[in-house]
Amino acid sequence: MSRPPRHLADLGLAERRQAVAELGEREFRADQLSRHYFGRYTDSAEDMTDLPAAVRSVLAAELLPPLLTSECELTCDKGATRKMLWRLFDGALVESVLMKYPDRVTMCVSSQAGCGIGCPFCATGQAGLTRNLSTAEIVAQVVAGERALRGAAPKTAHTRVSNENPASKPAHSRVSNIVFMGMGEPLANYRNVIAAVRRLTDPVPGGLGISQRSITVSTVGLVPAIARLASEGLSVTLAVSLHAPDDEARDELVPVNRRWKVAEVLSAAWDYAAATGRRVSIEYALIKDINDQAWRADLLGSLLAGHLAHVNLIPLNPTPGSKWTASLPGVQEEFVDRIAAHGVPVTVRDTRGREIDGACGQLAARAVPARTGRAARTAPAAAVADAPHGGTSATPTGIAAPSGATSLPLA
């Protein structure tokens, strides 16, 4: 498989200086180039007027090749939520989401094109894995978000605006928070994700200068990788997509649980919290009659009590035709109350983007038909299409695999 072209964001500052020297230019040009990309969010040679014309053209061509082509852009929430679909150099599709709040701007980025984990309720998981993203392809999503905030988002032939106020003007604040909760399992692309985190957090000209404490890295529970992350000396937040407190349900909802059970995943999470002093976020998508029973709330609360953790409950954002849906409001409220009764902080995630295919993988799924063959086999064999959904039995006898559903990731 061919690789993306080498990009400045793939390299550390010292490596950039060496690359510039190999092109016959003085090393300080690497710092100039880096300031344009990481400080002014431009990769256009025409914008780099502090470099001689001939030099800027050569350096931009060699170290700032285009990585993302805008395929589609959708907005809603009066322009506060913007979802972008990107086509990569090899035709692979990835998504990112820009979300503006009164006190912050959060960018949700993808780390893989598709995903190989195969969670049956996730649109991305049903598509299968295409490939890992390079460090620069991850970073480029955030740079694109910065440009979008400044009204310089690329125009496409497939732009749809929903519920947007035409008189609104783009915000001129910076991206302040990054969540690795887009397409893919971040810790399955460990090397490039960690390099991207460093590039996002190193000060300009080394990187974008975003606080490490404002970065969240999500995982379904790759235990060895969590342990490795704890040793990196980073201050990022770890988010564990748990979705069930018991192995029986989690084996179906998150197939990797068949390799690392709930107890192992939580033990690794507590080790991470001890090593970093950072509170672990426990992500839990509430699915009607599947994992929203009162006894599961009590079990979850008892497992987390006394630990440095908080629960982020996610109302499921189903795709059209999905057999699974979000829990009823009363059930959700009881779930929250039962967790809180154990002294565990719990919040319900603000769900956005339903009208713009806001869930991860939904937009890409519309652009490309579902994959077959090996990718299609990533869904667990135990997912039964005819499984019952009625009632509130403590242990469901089967879990139906929908066409794909998940929730828009928010910080």
Image (tube, grey):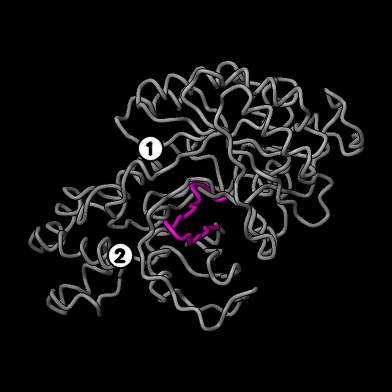
For the residues marked 1 and 2, what is the alpha-carbon distance in whole angstroms?
28 Å
Question: Image check: 329 left or right of 271?
Answer: right
Residue 411 is left or right of residue 348, and the answer is: left
In this view, the residue in front, 348 or 199, is: 348
The secondary structure type at the circle numbered 2 is loop
Q: Is residue 306 magenta?
A: no
Q: Residue at x 59, y 16 (%)?
A: 263
At which x and y percent is residue 322? 81, 50
Q: Nearer the viewer, mark 1 or mark 2?
A: 1
- Tell me which corner region of the image, top left, top right, bottom left or bottom right, holds residue 102: bottom left
Which x, y percent locates residue 150? Answer: 38, 73
Give the x, y percent position of residue 349: 60, 46
Residue that appears at 40% across and 58% down: 142
The foreground one among 223 and 357 is: 357
320 lies above or below 387: below
Q: Residues within 10 Å of mark 1 (few under 14, many from 20)?
A: many
Q: Is residue 271 above or below residue 332?
A: above
What residue is disc 1 on?
Answer: 236
**Image position of 41 with respect to 263: above or below:** below
Note whether 261 is above or below 363 in the view shown: above
The residue labelled by disc 2 is 64
Q: Which residues are magenta?
A: 95-113
- In the rendered image, residue 105 lying in the magenta stretch gets the answer yes
Residue type for callout 2: Leu
The crowd level at tag 2 (other Cα within 10 Å; few <14, some 14-19, many 20+) is: many
Residue occupying image coordinates x 83% and y 35%: 289
Quarter holding residue 366: bottom right
Q: Main secondary structure of the magenta part?
A: strand
